[in-house]
Amino acid sequence: MSLLKKLAGQTAIYGLSSILGRLLNYLLVPLYTRVFDTGEYGVVTQFYAYAAFLNILFTYGLETAFFRFSQTENNRPQVYSTALISLLFSSVAFFVTITLFAQPIAASFVAADQLDSRLPLYVIWFAGILAADAITAIPFARLRQQNKAMRFAMIRLVNILLNIGFNLFFLVVCPKWTAQHPESWMTSVYDPSHGVGYVFLSNLLASLFTLLLLLPQLRPVTTGFDRALWNKMLRYALPLMVAGFAGMVNETFDRIMLPRLVADPSTSLDQLGIYGACYKLSILMTLFVQTFRYAAEPFFFSQAGKEDARMIYARVMDWFVLGCAFIFAAVMLFMDVFQLFIGEKFRTGLPVVPILLLANLCLGVYLNISIWYKITGKTGWGAWFSIFGALITIILNVLFIPKMGYVGAAWTTLVCYAAMMVVSYFVGQRYYHVPYDIFWFFLSVGLALVVWGSGSYFSGFGLPPGIRYAINSALLMLFPVMAWLLMKQKSRKFVDH
């Protein structure tokens, strides 16, 4: 339990940068969905979907390889220096390549009749974002490995606050100020024709400033570059990169395919914008999964050689599933509040939110289970699982999107992650048995569904908002009470074991 408390404490600190910080960043969604129309926000959604794939290419699995080889190699500074130098050179090379081909890349993003002359510039800005973020990946990983969670959190928060500040400056302050003061100096730095481009410029400026904050971590590369070590790290990392690409197909390829597969092409960017905005309403689940992963990955590796490691992994999974189930119940019970975060014209997509919440829950369980192939070094399995999921994603999106639009994309995401979770569990039990409690998984999820269903039942009586919120609050508080009683019983069995 002391180890679990330590993990929970680190998760809380990482949550300062991830959950709190990203929630601050999440406040940009109401701004975007009110400043831009559905089609313009569709452009933003599409750019970030492509960027997700390129981010994997820019880092090519070296972050996880750094964690692994820091545990197995005697010379930790050499591992850090080799990984950092590798990313420095490759990031510059990728940035130059994308810059040279910015025009044809931009043309591939949208249909010819929707191509804007400024898109190549946005592509270059995005290449800068990707390069800066890739270079900082290893310094951030080292902070996690050294348990410097507070410094990690503060730098992440600065990045997010800067991004928010630049967005507010370009999208709110500049338009109002230049409209009232047309002779102001702001007219020399603000061009209203850029529109959504300022979303990308704000991100670039924040990423470059973060790179400056991490310069002290970039300096200690005096131990040089070990080619033999680099080759070993690449052999470990490249299957993870393949898995990352396939995994990103599962996570974002629906937003790339959607504009090309909808029955009415004239609504493609509008549907993409609506889907992208409603996807943000599942952000609490996504943030919890991401924050937990930041703390759990180094924690799992540090426990790998201990006698009770597998019992600890199973115990962690119980609490993780419980946390995800609680988030699902909270979001669904108070959906009429959460929906206010997006503009009214985007709310037609709300029916996809519970589907996406359950999908992200399954993804979180899969990421927990996947520790088995990272610990055993069988990273090739991770690639196969992700390829399996990618095939499901591609096939079902091709079948569902033309008939169901973005709703079909949401169902595809849930089926994909659920299938990957199940397959990884059964294969993992063969190579690295962990006594996960399957019944507890269904019990936690079922409890969340019952709580949500009860709230929906009472809302059907047309009760005043105050009474409805009181009932939903009582139902939500009932969830942890029931879960605590059940977990207390499990704890007795765990101690007896």
Image (cartoon, rainbow, N blue to C red):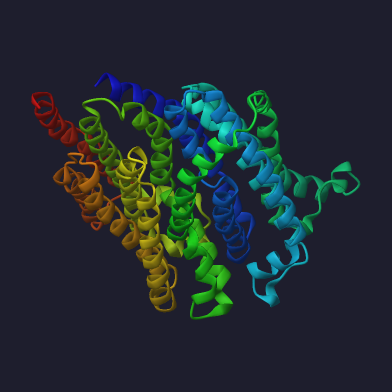
Residue 361, above or below 392 = above
Task: Count how many numbered circles sit on residues in the image.
Answer: 0
In terms of depth relative to the viewer, which is nearer, 87 or 422? 87
Is residue 202 at least partly visible in the picture?
A: no
- Residue furthest front as drawn: 228
285 left or right, relative to 202: left
Q: Residue at x 29, y 57 (%)?
A: 418
Look at 45% across and 44% down and name the residue there. 236
Residue 410 at x, y = what percent? 39, 63
Q: Position of residue 338 (x, y in %)?
A: 42, 48
Q: Is residue 5 left or right of residue 142?
A: left
Picture residue at 16% right of the left edge, 36% below the top: 482
Q: Where is residue 150 shown, x and y percent of the image?
A: 51, 22
Q: Position of residue 449 (x, y in %)?
A: 22, 51
- Give the quarter of the figure containing the N terminus: top left
**320 in relation to 259, above or below:** above
Q: Quadrant of the C terminus?
A: top left
Residue that protrudes farthest toward the bottom in the picture: 263
Q: Is residue 27 visible?
A: yes
Residue nearest the observer in this picture, 272 or 106: 106
**Quadrant in the picture for residue 392:** bottom left
